[in-house]
Structures are given as structure tokens and as C-alpha cells.
Image (cartoon, rainbow, N blue to C red):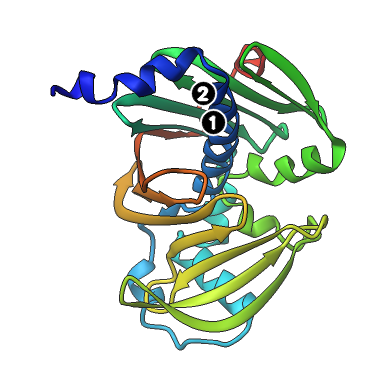
Amino acid sequence: MNKRGRYAPFFVALTSNLYYTFMKKFLSLWVMVAFLATQSFASIGESTEASTGTVENDPASVIAKYIQAVGGAENVAKIKNSIMVMEASLQGATLVMKTVADSENHRMMQETSFMGNVASKTIFKDGKAKAMAMGQEQAIPDEMAEMLKIQTYAFPETQYEAMGYTLELQGTEKIKKEDAHKLIITAPNGMKTVEYYSVESGLKLRTSSEATGDITYANYQEKDGVKIPMKLTIKSPMLPMELETVVKEVSFNSTLKDSDFN
């Protein structure tokens, strides 16, 4: 049986209620993956020096080492906006996610295309957020919209304290044979995310949450003087298999238009 025939049942399901339910769940997961992916930038900067520092045992030092690894607070502050395009394959079908984040004007747009067609879009601007999926538009509650504000930053870690997030360090764990600090991030609404930072380099290795499962970052490459993970591996109970996501395009401090957020 050829590849198309093997996956025929999947494509037949495109018109079924089962597919509709699955895609609602999957697109929600995919959007959250993109949010978390924007938090994993790392500048080429002075990362070699940072990796030789003494391991500290408090959340602030883990974040400080991460900021140093990404080029220092001054360089991080220079990034006012970012554009990221990610791509994944799900049983032969291609998904593309484009994220435009503008911290200078506190706005963000995420668009997901499935098999060449726009399947969902999330927009945050003027303190409000809305989501459009499967031909339906829905306002996002203010509590959730407030959480999107931090995602307008290329390096949201610098905003944790200012936006009321709390951090707790729970020792170290092995992530793919590498020692990693385990950091519990609690949002103002109580939602928890676990982030794992390399003890040696300070880079972010994995993000875990009940909503998304595990997102593991790999294949860091330099782009415009900035080093980012070009591969994200997603393991979630919402998916029948691990999903590999590849970052196709990244740019910083682009000229943005208001129409980019419509």
C-alpha cells in the first residue's frame, strides 16, 4: 500500500465530527507550543563563559544565567519584535505556524495553516484577545488574554517578576543525559509550567505542562547573531505519536504593520 493509501482513513476523517474534535484539541496544543517556543531563544553572545560559572541553587540565578547565555540584559532589551515560522508533519499533512510578537506595542498574532489552508488564528492587541478556528470566532477571557501579554516578548523570562509570575527551583534532573535545573513557573492565575535549564550552558532544554506535555528543544543554530533551537519535539497525550517541529524562519526587529495583527 502506498503512503497515500495508508493514510486514506485520516483524510476521509477531514469531514467527520471526529476530525473536527481532534483538530480543535490539536490546534489548541499547537498554539501553546508556539507560545512556549518563543521562550527558547539563546544568543551566541558569551554563552561559553556562562557555561563555566558556578551552579547556584535559587531561581533568580538560573534565570540570570539564562539571560547571560542569551547575550545579557542589554542585548535582550534591544529585541522589540520577532517573527517565527514553524512547520510540522502530522500523518503526511503539513502544518505551518506563523507567530508575530511585538513587545513594544504589546500585540501578537499567531496563524496556523493546515494542508495549505488557514485553520486558526489568535490575535492579542489593545489588552484583548480573540481566537478564530474552524470558521468560528471567539473572544478569549481577560484572564487568559493577560497571560498572552508576556508572550509578546522574545525573552519573556525577563518579565516574570514584573508580571507577577512566581518561580521555584526543585533541584536538578537529567534531560537527555544532561543535568538540568528544574524550575516551576506559576502564572498569576495559578497555571504551572516546568522549565528545564542546562546546568552547564544555561540554555533551555525542555518545557513541560499538563496542557502541552513535553516540548524538548534541540539543534541550536545561529540566526542573525542569535542562537535558537531549530527543532522542537512534542510528546503529548493529545497526540498519537511524538511530533517533530522545525523552525523554518526567524527574524527580529522587523518593520511591522497594523494589518499584521488583523
- List x then y, in percent, for residue 69: 44, 65
Q: CA distance from mark 1 to mark 2?
A: 5 Å
Check the picture and name the quadrant holding the C terminus: top right
Q: Which residue is mark 1?
A: 22
Q: Residue furthest right?
A: 142
Amino acid carrying mark 1 in the image: Phe
- List x then y, in percent, for residue 77: 60, 50
Q: Which residue is more in the foreground, 25 or 153?
A: 25
Classify 240 as above or below 185.
Answer: above
Residue located at (18% from left, 24% from top): 3
Label 2: few (<14), some or many (≥20) within 10 Å?
some
Residue 100, quarter of picture = top right
Q: Which residue is mark 2?
A: 19
Check the picture and name the quadrant holding the N terminus: top left
Q: Name the secondary structure under disc 1.
A: helix
Amino acid carrying mark 2 in the image: Tyr
Classify 10 as above or below 26.
Answer: above
Q: Which residue is more in the foreground, 90 or 207?
A: 90
Horizontal side of 76 relative to 133 (left or right) equals left
Horizontal side of 143 relative to 167 (left or right) equals right
Residue located at (63% from left, 77% from top): 59
- List x then y, in percent, for residue 119: 54, 18
Label 1: few (<14), some or many (≥20) within 10 Å?
some
Could you tell me if residue 59 is visible in this image?
yes
Residue located at (66% from left, 38% from top): 103
Q: Name the secondary structure under disc 2.
A: helix
- List x then y, in percent, for residue 161: 75, 63
Classify 3 as above or below 217.
Answer: above
Query: Residues at badges 1 and 2 in contact (C-beta under 8 Å)?
Result: yes
Horizontal side of 14 relative to 80 (left or right) equals left
Q: Which residue is more in the foreground, 86 or 25?
A: 25
Could you tell me if residue 81 is visible in this image?
no
